[in-house]
Amino acid sequence: MTRKLDAPIVRDNLRDAFMKKTLVMLITFCGVLAARADLSVFAAASATDALKEIAAAHEMDGGESVRFNFASSGTLARQIDAGAPADVFLSANERWMDWLESTGAANLHGRFNCAANALVLVAPPGSTLKFDGVLNGRVAVGDFKSVPAGIYAEEALAHMGWLAAWRPKLIMSSNVRTALLYVQRGEVEAGIVYATDAKAAGLRVVGTFPADSHGPIVYPVAACSEKESALRFLEFLKSDKAKAILKKHGFTDARD
């Protein structure tokens, strides 16, 4: 004779089975999260838009999600030197990458130049400024001591013979995106930024500084941790998909 199960017993058995299934799913999900732990990327502010799009494409291709820390390359290099947990460092110049490598604070590996850029003079909408060294108002630039765009700007202005006359009118900023913001707000007569920044902001380019007026504007990138995911992200940066995104944002190919 078949014994009927009481309704409470049936409910309890179903609940237990559900709880066990949920527990298995939760454990599996946690395992997936552990395998796809966030990747910490410290990157130059000028690469913000392109890298965010690259990170999204990387994740869609099965890569780890990326947590960014955007700032000037000098600030980032000092943070990593002080022990900040970066998995990847992308600098807007070779100087800060070389400096970080020389300190031995981070085990940099897999280094290569992933992109290049140009230096331009931009002006707010409606400006009639010319690329002839004549200046009436203030000019926003990255800090000469720590911001790569500022370092390039100082070299370029010296090469053009404009530095002495312009120096009293220069407004130093903590990173190139801040300099760009001053121009967008019309708070300065002009700004010296990267060609990619000018394109992103839709600002008028008054002129492009000759390539031989400053050091090569390249973006070296390297892994700072032993995570395999860091090297996978570097490999993705070499992919055609990543290169297409960089090109769309105005970057050019770098020559290692």
Image: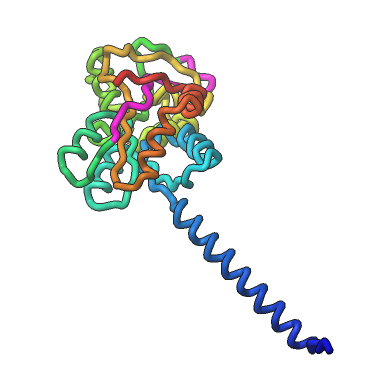
The residue located at (53%, 36%) in the rendering is: 57
Q: Quadrant of the C terminus?
A: top left
The residue located at (70%, 81%) in the rendering is: 13
The answer to whether residue 121 is magenta is: yes
Q: Quadrant of the N terminus?
A: bottom right
Does residue 73 appear to the left or right of 35 in the view shown?
left
Residue 254 appears in the figure: yes
Does residue 159 appear to the left or right of 114 in the view shown?
left
Q: Main secondary structure of the magenta part?
A: strand
Q: Percent from the top left, x then y, of residue 139?
A: 36, 26
Q: Percent from the top left, x then y, of residue 21?
A: 63, 69
Q: Percent from the top left, x then y, of residue 17?
A: 66, 75
Q: Nearer the viewer, residue 231 or 203?
A: 231
Q: Is the image coloured rainbow, by chain, by secondary structure, or in one colour?
A: rainbow
The residue located at (45%, 29%) in the rendering is: 183
Which quadrant of the view contains residue 115? Answer: top left
- Tell me where the magenta segment starts and ends, as one range: 110-128
Q: Residue pushed farthest front?
A: 1
Q: Nearer the viewer, residue 106 or 184?
A: 106
Which quadrant of the view contains residue 179? Answer: top left
Q: Is residue 211 above or below residue 97?
A: above
Residue 136 appears in the figure: no
The residue located at (65%, 78%) in the rendering is: 16
Q: Percent from the top left, x then y, of residue 43?
A: 37, 39
In this rendering, the count of numbered labels is: 0
Q: Is residue 225 above or below residue 4?
A: above
The answer to whether residue 130 is magenta is: no
Which quadrant of the view contains residue 146? Answer: top left
Q: Nearer the viewer, residue 93 or 165?
A: 93
Does residue 13 appear to the left or right of 160 in the view shown?
right
